[in-house]
Image (cartoon, helix red, strand yellow):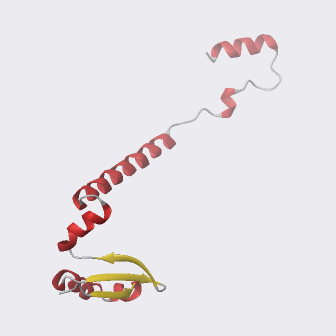
Amino acid sequence: MPTEIRKINFTDFRKHASNELKFVYEELGHLWLHNHGKPRCVVIPMRDELVLHRAIGLDPKEAMHRVMVDADRMVSAIEERKRWMSEPVLPWSGSYPPVGMDDETYRKWKATRR
Protein backbone atom coordinates (compact mmCIF):
# COMPACT_ATOMS: atom_id res chain seq x y z
CA MET A 1 0.00 0.00 0.00
CA PRO A 2 1.50 3.37 -0.99
CA THR A 3 2.13 5.98 1.68
CA GLU A 4 -0.61 8.56 1.97
CA ILE A 5 0.57 12.16 1.72
CA ARG A 6 -1.32 15.15 3.07
CA LYS A 7 -0.49 18.75 2.22
CA ILE A 8 -1.33 21.33 4.85
CA ASN A 9 -0.34 24.93 5.49
CA PHE A 10 1.35 26.00 8.72
CA THR A 11 -1.69 27.84 10.06
CA ASP A 12 -3.93 24.78 9.74
CA PHE A 13 -1.18 22.58 11.17
CA ARG A 14 -0.99 24.79 14.29
CA LYS A 15 -4.77 24.55 14.74
CA HIS A 16 -4.97 20.77 14.23
CA ALA A 17 -1.49 19.57 15.21
CA SER A 18 -2.57 16.67 17.41
CA ASN A 19 -4.88 15.19 14.74
CA GLU A 20 -2.29 15.65 12.00
CA LEU A 21 0.45 14.03 14.09
CA LYS A 22 -1.85 11.07 14.80
CA PHE A 23 -2.17 10.68 11.03
CA VAL A 24 1.62 10.48 10.84
CA TYR A 25 2.32 8.04 13.68
CA GLU A 26 -0.85 5.92 13.58
CA GLU A 27 -1.56 5.76 9.83
CA LEU A 28 2.14 6.08 8.88
CA GLY A 29 1.36 8.91 6.48
CA HIS A 30 3.57 11.78 5.40
CA LEU A 31 2.63 15.36 6.13
CA TRP A 32 3.90 18.12 3.85
CA LEU A 33 3.85 21.53 5.46
CA HIS A 34 3.40 24.45 3.10
CA ASN A 35 3.94 28.18 3.59
CA HIS A 36 2.39 30.52 1.02
CA GLY A 37 1.80 27.55 -1.27
CA LYS A 38 5.42 26.38 -1.23
CA PRO A 39 6.46 23.13 0.46
CA ARG A 40 8.77 23.90 3.40
CA CYS A 41 9.17 20.65 5.36
CA VAL A 42 7.92 17.09 5.75
CA VAL A 43 6.84 15.20 8.87
CA ILE A 44 7.41 11.46 8.53
CA PRO A 45 6.87 8.54 10.93
CA MET A 46 9.84 6.98 12.72
CA ARG A 47 9.25 3.82 10.66
CA ASP A 48 10.75 5.75 7.77
CA GLU A 49 13.94 6.38 9.72
CA LEU A 50 15.85 4.25 7.19
CA VAL A 51 14.63 6.48 4.36
CA LEU A 52 15.78 9.53 6.31
CA HIS A 53 19.13 7.86 6.95
CA ARG A 54 19.61 7.28 3.22
CA ALA A 55 18.51 10.80 2.32
CA ILE A 56 20.88 12.67 4.62
CA GLY A 57 23.60 10.04 4.83
CA LEU A 58 23.57 10.22 8.62
CA ASP A 59 21.95 8.13 11.31
CA PRO A 60 19.16 10.23 12.90
CA LYS A 61 20.54 9.44 16.37
CA GLU A 62 23.94 10.77 15.29
CA ALA A 63 22.26 13.86 13.80
CA MET A 64 20.43 14.49 17.09
CA HIS A 65 23.68 14.02 19.00
CA ARG A 66 25.37 16.62 16.80
CA VAL A 67 22.50 19.05 17.35
CA MET A 68 22.84 18.65 21.12
CA VAL A 69 26.63 19.14 21.00
CA ASP A 70 26.19 22.28 18.90
CA ALA A 71 23.59 23.60 21.37
CA ASP A 72 25.98 22.99 24.29
CA ARG A 73 28.74 24.81 22.42
CA MET A 74 26.44 27.76 21.77
CA VAL A 75 25.52 27.98 25.47
CA SER A 76 29.22 27.89 26.40
CA ALA A 77 30.02 30.62 23.89
CA ILE A 78 27.23 32.83 25.24
CA GLU A 79 28.45 32.33 28.82
CA GLU A 80 32.03 33.15 27.78
CA ARG A 81 30.86 36.30 26.03
CA LYS A 82 28.91 37.40 29.12
CA ARG A 83 32.00 36.79 31.27
CA TRP A 84 34.21 38.68 28.84
CA MET A 85 31.77 41.61 28.65
CA SER A 86 31.60 41.86 32.44
CA GLU A 87 35.37 42.27 32.94
CA PRO A 88 36.43 45.82 33.78
CA VAL A 89 38.21 47.81 31.10
CA LEU A 90 40.95 50.35 31.82
CA PRO A 91 39.33 53.77 31.53
CA TRP A 92 40.74 56.11 28.90
CA SER A 93 41.65 58.69 31.50
CA GLY A 94 44.13 56.27 33.12
CA SER A 95 45.96 55.42 29.91
CA TYR A 96 46.96 58.97 28.88
CA PRO A 97 48.91 61.56 30.87
CA PRO A 98 47.05 64.66 32.01
CA VAL A 99 47.13 67.63 29.66
CA GLY A 100 49.88 70.20 30.29
CA MET A 101 52.29 67.87 32.09
CA ASP A 102 55.95 68.90 31.84
CA ASP A 103 58.67 66.42 30.79
CA GLU A 104 59.97 65.63 34.29
CA THR A 105 56.50 65.00 35.69
CA TYR A 106 55.65 62.90 32.60
CA ARG A 107 58.69 60.65 33.17
CA LYS A 108 57.64 60.10 36.81
CA TRP A 109 54.04 59.44 35.75
CA LYS A 110 55.17 56.98 33.05
CA ALA A 111 57.41 55.12 35.55
CA THR A 112 54.40 54.50 37.82
CA ARG A 113 52.43 52.94 34.93
CA ARG A 114 54.87 50.12 34.27
Q: Position of residue 14 (x, y in %)?
A: 35, 84
For image coordinates 66% across by 12% down, the residue present is 111
Q: Quadrant of the N terminus?
A: bottom left
Relative to 42, does residue 84 appear above or below in the rendering? above
Quadrant of residue 90 in the image? top right
For image coordinates 29% across by 84% down, the residue present is 17
Q: Nearer the viewer, residue 4 or 36?
A: 4
Q: Quadrant of the C terminus?
A: top right
Relative to 110, does residue 93 appear above or below in the rendering? below
Q: Position of residue 59 (x, y in %)?
A: 24, 59
Quadrant of residue 26 in the image? bottom left
Q: Position of residue 44 (x, y in %)?
A: 26, 76
How many marks the image carries: the answer is 0
Q: Nearer the viewer, residue 31 or 69?
A: 31
Relative to 42, does residue 63 appear above or below in the rendering? above
Q: Nearer the viewer, residue 7 or 11?
A: 7
For image coordinates 29% across by 59% down, the residue present is 57
Q: Position of residue 88 (x, y in %)?
A: 53, 36
For image coordinates 24% across by 82% down, the residue present is 21
Q: Is residue 94 left or right of residue 44?
A: right
Q: Nearer the viewer, residue 24 or 78?
A: 24
